[in-house]
Amino acid sequence: MPFTAQHAEHGRLDATQPDLGCGQSWEDIHRARAPLHCPACESRMVARVSVLGLRHFAHRRRSPNCPLAGESAGHLLLKSDLAAAGRAAGWQMLLEAAAPHGAWRADVLAVSAEGRQFALEAQLSPITEDGVLERTARYTADGVGVCWFDDRERPRPWMAAAPSLHVSGPSDEPRTVRRGIARYTARDAWGMVEGISLNDAVAWILDGRLAPHEEQYFRARNAHDEYEGRFWTAPQYAAAAEEEAARHRAALRAQEALWQQKEAARKARAAAYERFWARTGIGPGWWRSFEAIVQGALGDETFFGAPSAAYGDGRPLYTKEDGRARVIAVALPDRLGAWAETTPVVVDAPWALHRMAELAFSDVKVFVASPDSESFECWWVRPGGVY
């Protein structure tokens, strides 16, 4: 049941237009039984009116291979309403228009005054997601925009994969959009917009006030709990959502960088501890005794940090002052630096004094906290000597 036919004298006829698009009346064509041909397969056609009063053309004989044959009344009605919506928006609407090279045939092809083209597809027959995407790709390859429309009770699964609108049925007057247009209202808050008339939706799409947008996931604040895929939205909403997504991505990158820094620091501390225990040969029991002697002499609030290269791979001893940690000594360093001029060293045996004297380049204060004698003594060392 196509809307178009080819007349030998008047050219292409469009049954959705009052003058058939060529300045002729329907009565002249219908009653005169004018010779008509199908624009797709060139078979003979006749002008008819359906039981619903819908003007259309039909093949004289069954043409199973014609792409315009076998259309349902619902499909014709939706095509007619789409054409009317596009004309109301000021666009030229060509029904059943085919590409010159034959790659696609649009149910309704909208053409702007500047020559821009946009296909409006009424898709009521079964189709797979791959089928919709493949046909969409053909339009895209020719620079033709496309929107798919379905007016059945429930939206089809493929509608999440392609630019589409789920609209109300032909019994509703006027038709409205049930699903497929969303508004971004707050952080991560996409909400489906319902009740927009089909005429407004088509006008906004053709004029660029709505554009396809794709989200991986969002919750809509209406009867439909969740939605994933493509929908139509205003460019400013898409920009706001992208800004928020960019902030999320930046926050995630910052969290990942912080985690990596912490993980690197953890691994560095673990490696420093392994080197410290291997170098000093101290076991857990010896260290606990050593730590107890030091804290008993220098204060219970003191605590040892991890081995630090800044303190000769020794373990800094901290105390807190006004909520801030301050280094007051360094335990068992492997080398001395400028810090040793003002910061005492703590060793675990008297013989270690001579090792500190070998490392010293100026006078260094050294505490001996010996687990063997359970004593805590203060000494000074200088390069090459102990006193």
Image: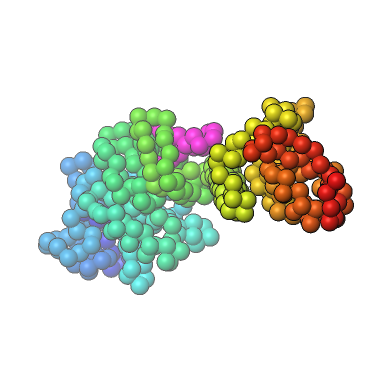
The correct choice, above or below, for 41 with respect to 289 in the image is: below
Q: Given the current orientation, which residue lies at the most extreme bottom position?
A: 101
Q: Given the current orientation, which residue lies at the most extreme left position?
A: 61
Q: Does the image show residue 229?
A: yes
Tell me which corner region of the image, top left, top right, bottom left or bottom right, holds residue 330.
top right
Q: Position of residue 324 (x, y in %)?
A: 75, 32
Q: Position of residue 251 (x, y in %)?
A: 58, 43
Q: Which residues are magenta?
A: 180-196
Q: Nearer the viewer, residue 262 or 126?
A: 262
Q: Nearer the viewer, residue 53 or 347?
A: 347
- Is 181 magenta? The answer is yes
Q: Residue at x 62, y 54 (%)?
A: 279
Q: Residue at x 69, y 47 (%)?
A: 332
Q: Is residue 16 left or right of residue 363?
A: left
The correct choice, above or below, for 125 with respect to 219 in the image is: below
Q: Given the current orientation, which residue lies at the most extreme front position?
A: 373
Q: Quadrant of the N terminus?
A: bottom left
Q: Is residue 353 left or right of residue 15?
A: right
Q: Residue at x 44, y 46 (%)?
A: 215
- Is 200 magenta? The answer is no
Q: Is residue 67 left or right of residue 178?
A: left
